[in-house]
Image (tube, grey):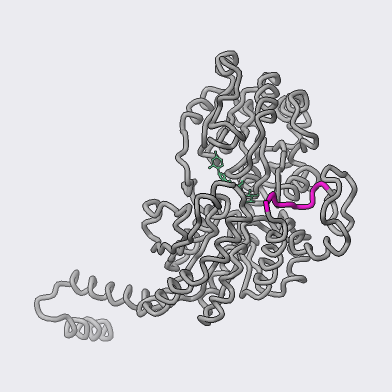
């Protein structure tokens, strides 16, 4: 009692005259948060300016921000993210010099090479400015996309640790890491791109699954990959939008081949409700259309943000979907059908003929579509974001990969996890009709749905306290704070 009285007396002595208890508490809170902000660390993120890479980088920023870190995003002027959607981030734009000519050829290798060659000085300047302006929040580290390999030497020269974010999955990364081996074994240049022969170095891949990136400059493509792998090895750590439970063997191999800290914290989008980092506006009419469909009755069709198709393929898809009789929601990005602006190639009256069974949009709120009870299957190009979003919603897939990591991911979906049908042959309306019916209407599709629901559960458990992804995130945050 005496002690309590002493304390009250002591406190009263310290309240300046005229200050109420509330004022004093506010003052104490100010002091507390000032000292907290002194402790707070800032992380600088630099995404590759392509949709499939920007999305996971911004999601990672939000995850780290929720964990008490301040976030600065350095970004190119090309495909700059919408800062209004992220008021809690600080955005710094750097000039990239990307000309219309480079962007319009839709050659991802050309864009990546250009950024690596031309952004060194603007990036160094932006980062140096940030480093010299950090009285309150010291910068702990830099996190950049794996493809931005030039950032390692900039970070080294500024004595800042660089952690790499690889936005795709681990199994496909290991194949990229084996590029030199595949060259030595004579796989490149690929003689028969349709060959079913096994790639013994990377089971269960077949020759046709070896990742190839469509480009006008294959030499630059090889250089880009080798630099990406080399500079990842030289980094201070590697973050994955993936998790041990679905890539256990790959994680084991990765840790042997890349002796740096590895953080499998994904899937990023599961850490918070669907947000939009979309560079294109989403057509929400598809949600009201889905509301009118029966449970698990719809096939959702989308090939991501880069893949293009020929007019012939477009028409085969249209007729295959129509002939299946299964309701479909189809994303056709403007410009994705070669030589057309949007849907001109469709026969006149095509959609009217389907009497509401088909709905086409330019861009959809994909996560919401996959989570919708009416969605029964996803015909995808197997970009990693789309694949992971499908797993997280328990939606089985039809796989039709186009290039790069997609061919490896598709093989894992169909042959390892067995949660999708592989459309192995060229796009033909009869094949498409059969695949859609098998997935949506037949027992085979239901079995895949059961298996993918099991994977979904594994993901959910991994993200809870005690789960491997949960623990990996804790480790990552401690690691960043240790710099
Ligand atoms: C690219 C590569 O093609 C892919 O292979 C690699 O794994 C990542 O970079 P992208 O082709 O865009 O990505 O495919 P994906 O990774 O699937 O990302 C597409 C993203 O766009 C997903 O997050 C998806 O939800 C979103 N999306 C797609 C929409 O929001 N609306 C749409 O209509 C279509």
The correct choice, above or below, for 127 with respect to 189 in the image is: below
In this view, 163 is above or below 351? below
360 and 17: which is toward the camera: 360
| Residue 45 in the image, given as x and y percentages of width and height | 49, 65
Judged by its main secondary structure, the magenta piece is loop
Could you tell whether 156 is left or right of 220 in the image? left
- Residue 438 part of the magenta-drawn span: no
In the image shown, does 29 or 111 lie closer to the viewer? Answer: 111
- Picture quadrant of residue 433: top right
Location of residue 472 with respect to 324 vertically, above or below:
below
| Quarter containing the N terminus | bottom left
Q: Position of residue 280 (x, y in %)?
A: 47, 42
Above or below for 478 versus 186: below
Q: Residue furthest front?
A: 101
- Residue 212, magenta (yes or no): yes
How many numbered marks appear? 0
Q: Quadrant of residue 299?
A: top right
**Residue 478, x across and y down, in percent:** 54, 73
Q: As drawn, is 275 to the left or to the right of 347?
A: left
Give the residue displayed 48% in from the left and 74% down from the top. 124
**Magenta part of the protein: which range?**
208-216
Counting from the top left corner in percent of width and height, residue 164 is at 60, 67
Q: Name the side, left or right, on which 477 lies relative to 12.
A: right
Residue depicted at 88% across the width and 44% down the height: 196
């Amino acid at each position: 009692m005496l002690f309590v009285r002493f304390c009250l007396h002591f406190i009263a002595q310290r309240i300046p005259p005229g200050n109420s208890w509330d004022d004093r508490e506010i003052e104490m809170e100010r002091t507390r948060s000032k000292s907290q902000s002194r402790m707070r660390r800032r992380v600088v993120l630099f995404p590759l300016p392509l949709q499939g890479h920007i999305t996971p980088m911004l999601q990672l920023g939000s995850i780290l921000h929720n964990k008490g870190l301040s976030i600065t995003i350095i970004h190119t002027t090309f495909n700059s993210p919408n800062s209004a959607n992220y008021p809690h981030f600080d955005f710094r734009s750097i000039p990239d010099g990307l000309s219309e000519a480079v962007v319009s050829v839709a050659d991802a290798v050309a864009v990546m090479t250009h950024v690596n060659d031309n952004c060194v000085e603007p990036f160094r300047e932006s980062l140096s400015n940030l480093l010299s302006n950090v009285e309150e929040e010291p910068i702990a580290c830099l996190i950049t996309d794996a493809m931005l390999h030039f950032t390692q030497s900039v970070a080294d020269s500024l004595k800042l640790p660089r952690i790499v974010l690889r936005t795709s999955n681990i199994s496909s990364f290991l194949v990229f890491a084996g590029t030199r081996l595949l060259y030595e074994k004579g796989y490149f240049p690929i003689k028969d791109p349709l060959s079913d022969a096994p790639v013994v170095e990377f089971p269960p891949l077949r020759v046709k699954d070896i990742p190839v990136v469509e480009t006008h400059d294959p030499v630059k493509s090889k250089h880009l990959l080798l630099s990406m792998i080399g500079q990842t090895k030289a980094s201070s750590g590697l973050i994955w939008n993936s998790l041990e439970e679905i890539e256990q063997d790959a994680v084991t191999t990765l840790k042997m081949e890349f002796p740096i800290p590895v953080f499998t914290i994904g899937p990023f989008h599961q850490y918070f409700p669907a947000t939009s980092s979309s560079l294109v506006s989403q057509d929400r009419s598809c949600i009201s259309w889905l509301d009118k469909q029966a449970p698990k009755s719809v096939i959702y069709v989308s090939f991501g943000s880069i893949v293009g198709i020929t007019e012939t393929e477009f028409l085969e898809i249209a007729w295959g979907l129509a002939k299946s009789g299964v309701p479909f929601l189809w994303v056709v990005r403007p410009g994705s059908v070669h030589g057309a602006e949007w849907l001109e190639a469709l026969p006149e009256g095509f959609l009217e003929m389907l009497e509401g069974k088909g709905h086409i949009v330019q861009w959809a709120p994909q996560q919401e579509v996959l989570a919708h009870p009416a969605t029964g299957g996803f015909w995808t190009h197997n970009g990693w974001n789309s694949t992971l979003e499908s797993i997280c919603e328990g939606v089985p897939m039809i796989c039709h990969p186009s290039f790069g990591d997609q061919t490896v991911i598709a093989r894992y979906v169909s042959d390892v996890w067995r949660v999708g049908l592989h459309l192995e042959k060229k796009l033909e309306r009869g094949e498409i009709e059969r695949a859609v019916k098998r997935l949506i209407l037949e027992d085979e599709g239901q079995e895949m749905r059961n298996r993918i629901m099991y994977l979904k559960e594994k993901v959910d458990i991994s993200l809870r306290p005690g789960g491997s992804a949960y623990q990996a995130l804790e480790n990552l945050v401690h690691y960043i704070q240790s710099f």
